[in-house]
Image (spheres, rainbow, N blue to C red):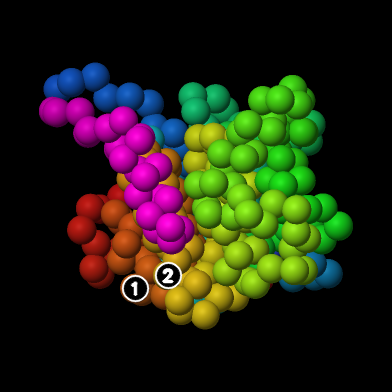
Amino acid sequence: MTTLDVMRQVRRKADSGKPNAPAKGEFMPDPVIRLSGISKIFHTDEVETHALSEVSLGFDAGDYVAISGPSGCGKSTLLSVLGLLDTPNAGEYVLSGRSVANLGLAERARIRNREVGFIFQAFNLIGDLTVFENVELPLVYRGTPGAERKRRTLKALERVGMSHRRKHFPSQLSGGQQQRVAVARAVVGEPSILLADEPTGNLDSKNGTEVMDMLDALHQGGATICMVTHDPRYAGRAERTIRLFDGRIVPDPGERNPV
Ligand SMILES: Nc1ncnc2c1ncn2[C@@H]1O[C@H](COP(=O)(O)OP(=O)(O)O)[C@@H](O)[C@H]1O
Ligand SMILES: [Mg+2]
């Protein structure tokens, strides 16, 4: 069975896929994410870099959004703020109904662990942990009991077709396999949002397409995804694209659904 077959099976099992958008006048659910006027400035020596300037956006449950723009325009900074890896200098951030822009370190880490799954360009697996232990890690931090941890870790590995490699170490895997493990680690805790920063950047096109197929299947299963990508073919798979330039959101010429 190919990875895609596994993902298709998962997709069929997911009861109804993406929730339907409510009709006009019906109750509108709160968005998963609402950023208002977010700014991020980096100070190095005497240089001030305005990495993000007054960024406002919203994601609803089940959204699949691509972020694009030239190198240095603030894409990774935006993902770091969204994923609570970094705090903005100004602005409001509401995640799952809760204001999170100004939380302390420990509380931020706790919410990040529950709400966010990360997929990085460089995979970022821990080299001296096995595949199983890498995927299990978010649940260890969360204090999930052993039996439940094992069940969920194996399920996540099955979803990405990597169960048979669970005792391997990352260095024994190809890049494509490592990224599949990273996807399993990102989804094991069933986060509110998946953030992917150029997830295919270190992969050849066959492996890149496989990882993108996996994200598509997760989206079909109801996941909310925000992905940074340089590749227009992959950005085209998302439902909308947010374009950044010099830390600001600019209109997207090919936009189908305006922000
Ligand atoms: N930790 C940091 N310290 C200082 N400057 C940073 C830091 N991170 C990013 N920057 C600067 O902020 C800007 C946006 O960076 P980044 O978000 O990484 O862009 P992108 O991901 O779009 O290539 C760049 O000018 C970059 O040099
Ligand atoms: Mg970047």
Residue at 72% x, 47% y: name it: 132
Where does the magenta region start and end? 1-24
Of residue 45 and residue 166, the one placed in the foreground of this image is 166
Q: Quadrant of the N terminus?
A: bottom left
Q: In the rendered structure, find residue 233 and report the number of the disc placed on it.
A: 1
Horizontal and vertical percent for residue 62?
A: 36, 39
Position of residue 67 in the picture relative to residue 93 (left or right): left
Q: Is residue 3 magenta?
A: yes
Residue at 50% x, 35% y: name it: 192
Q: Is residue 4 magenta?
A: yes
Horizontal and vertical percent for residue 38?
A: 54, 47
Q: Is mark 2 within 8 Å of ligand 2?
A: no
Horizontal and vertical percent for residue 238?
A: 33, 58
Outermost residue toward the left in this view: 24
Neighbour tally class for label 2: few under 14, some 14-19, many 20 plus, Cα within 10 Å = some
Look at label 1 and name its amino acid: Arg
Number of the front mark, 1 or 2: 2
Location of mark 2 (residue): 209
Neighbour tally class for label 1: few under 14, some 14-19, many 20 plus, Cα within 10 Å = few
Q: Secondary structure at mark 1?
A: helix
Outermost residue toward the top in this view: 27
Residue at 49% x, 28% y: name it: 96
Q: Taking the image as drawn, is residue 76 in sight?
A: no
Marks 1 and 2, the one that precedes in the sequence:
2
Q: Tell me: residue 181, above or below residue 56.
A: below
Look at label 2 and name its amino acid: Thr
Q: Taking the image as drawn, is residue 127 in sight?
A: yes
Position of residue 13 in the picture relative to residue 77 (left or right): left
The answer for how far apart the CA atoms under marks 1 and 2 are is 10 Å
